[in-house]
Image: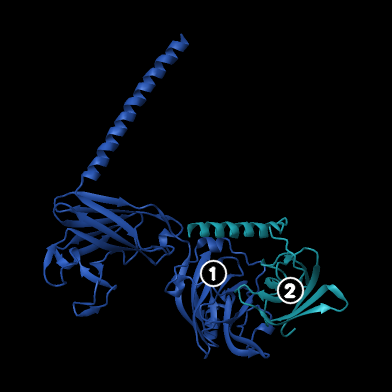
Chain colours: A blue, B cyan
Amino acid sequence: MINQYQLLIKNIVMKLLKYVTLSILAFSCFSCSKEEDSTLKNDLIKKTVAPAIAGEKIEFAYAIGAQKGQLSSAEVKASIAGAEGTGFELNSWFTARNKMVVNGVTYQAGEDVPVQTVKEASTNGPVSTASFMEKVDQSYINPTVAFGTSQSPIIAATVRYAYVVPAEAKGKSISFTFSSTSSVNDKASYSTPAYPVSKMDMKRLIDMTNQGACYFSIEDMKAYTKEEVAAQGLANKIDFIYIYQDKLNGFDYKHSIVSPGSDPKFIAIAGIVPSGATNKTPMEKHANVRDAQLKGSAPNVYIDDIDFQKLNLNEATDFALNFIKDDGAFMKTANGKYAAYIYVNNVDNNGKMTISIKRYPL
Amino acid sequence: MKNSYRILSFLFISLWMQSCGNFPLDDNNLLITDSKDCYISNFQLLGTDDRDVLTSSKISDVENDSTKGIITATAKFGTNLKHVKPKCSVAKDCILTPSMGGWVDFSQSREYTVISGNRQVKKTYTITVSLQGE
C-alpha cells in the first residue's frame, strides 16, 4: 500500500517537474529570441586593465549599431554608484587614417580623433545616461568620406563610459549593465562580470626634499617637515626619512631612505631623526617593479592586493640606500597596520625625490 | 637533387644520434661528458633589486690542494647579506651543488662544490663575503 502511494506521488512530482522544465525552456527561448531579433546590436570592451582602486577610473568602450532607425540613448547601471566624474563622455573617437585637421587641431595618421556623438550625458546615483545627437559627421560612419563634408544620422557609435571607483567599493565587487535603445524602440543590453575592487589606496607624485619635507607617514601617505612633525606630534607616525648625500664615510649613499630607528651608522645626517621617532620599518628595495599606475605610463605591470598579501619582509632591513629613478621599496609599518610600495618617479642631484605610493591595510 | 638531400639528412641524423649516444645522462638528465675542467670562473651576488652588490671578488685555489678553492668578495655598504642571491659561471659541462639562484644568508661563509662534466673531478669553494665599512 505504502509502495503504491509512493509511486503515485513520484509520478505526480515527475510530471510537475516536466511541465516546469518545459515552461522554463520555453520562456528562456522566448527571451533569447527577442534579444536576437532586435535590430539593435551592442558589444563592450573594458579598456582599463589596471586594478580598480578608489578614486581611479575604469573605462569602457560601448559599441552600438542600429540596423533599423538610428541610435537614441544609452544607459549604464553600476552595482555601486560611482564617485564624482562617473558618466558617459560626449565624444566618440576614431583613428585618423591620414593626417587631418578637425576643429582646428591637426591629427597625424594613427592618432585618436574626437567626434561628438552624445548630445547630453548625466549620472544620477548608479545610473548614467546618454542621449545621442541626431547627426554626426559622415566620415565617422563611412571613413571613405572626407571629414567635414557632410552629416549622417547616427546609426552606429562607440561611446566611452568612465566609472570612478568610490571609497565604499573597496574590497567589494562591482558590475555593470549597459543598455541602449534605438529610434524604433529596439533594445540591446550587455552585462559585465563582477570586477573586484582593490583594498589599496594610492597617491602619486609626492615631493620629498632633503632636510625639508623628508619625513614620511605611510598612514597619512604624506611627507612632513621637521617643524610639522614637532608641531602636530607626528613622531610616532613617521615610517621613513629621505636623506640625500653623495657619500657616507666614502661609500655611495645618494638618495636613501632610513627608518627613524635605523642603526645610526646608516643615517647620514646627524640629528635628522625627530625627537620621539623610533619606528623600525622593514623595507626591501626593488628595481624592476615599475607599476604603471604609480609610474603613470606603460608597461602595463601592476602591483595588486595579492602582492601585499604575500609580502614577506622577515629578512628585510629597516633602511634602503642608493635609489635611482624607477626604483622602489616594499615596506610594512612597524605597527603592522599597513604594507606599502614606494615608487621613485624621479630624483635630481640637489636632494629631491618624487615618489608615489600604493598602500594596503593588513 | 632530392636524393642528395635525403642522403645528407640521413647522414646528419645518424651522426647526431651517434654523438648523443656517447654521453649518458645523470640523475638530473644532464649530459655526462668527457670534460675534466672543474672551476668557478665568476661569482656575483644579487640584492633584492636584482643588482650585483659586490664591489670586488677574488677567486683563488688553495695551495697544494686542487680539490679546494676560495672566493673572497666585498659587498657594498648597507647590503643585507642575510638576503642575497648568489650567481656564478662554471667551466664547461660542470654542475654545482648546492645550486645557486635562491635567497641565501651570506652573513657567514658558505661552501659550494663544482663537479666536472665527466663527474670525476670535484672542487669545493668556500665563499666569504665581507661588507664595505666593516
Q: Residue at x 77, y 70 (%)?
A: B110
Q: Residue at x 19, y 80 (%)?
A: A104
Return the residue found at the far left. Answer: A150
x, y (%) of residue A293? 44, 70
Q: Is residue A277 visible?
A: no
Left or right of A26 in this view: A175: right
Q: Residue at x 55, y 57 (%)?
A: B7
Q: Residue placed at 49% from the left, 77% from the top?
A: A222
The residue tagged with tag 1: helix, strand or loop?
Answer: strand
The label number, if any, that marks residue A163 in the structure image:
none
Work out whether disc 2 and disc 1 sit on a shared chain.
no
Label 1, on which residue?
Answer: A340
Label 2 to label 1: alpha-carbon separation: 39 Å
Residue A356: image x %, image y %?
Answer: 48, 75
What chain does mark 2 sit on?
A: B
Q: Which of the two discs, 2 and 1, sits closer to the camera?
A: 2
Question: Mark 2 touching mark 1, by CB under 8 A?
Answer: no
Q: Give residue A250's position: percent from left, percent from top.
A: 67, 91
Q: Which chain does the numbered disc 1 sit on?
A: A
Count of numbered badges drawn on the protein: 2
A338 or B99, nearer to the observer: B99
Residue A292 vertical placement versus B6 (above, below): below
Position of residue B29 measured from the top left corner of the image (x, y, whole percent):
68, 56
Residue A10 shown left or right of residue A189 in the figure: right
Q: Amino acid at mark 1?
A: Ala
The answer to whether one can see residue B90 in this image is: yes
Q: At label 2, which amino acid type do we have? A: Ile
Q: Which residue is mark 2?
A: B40
Secondary structure category for the residue under label 2 = strand
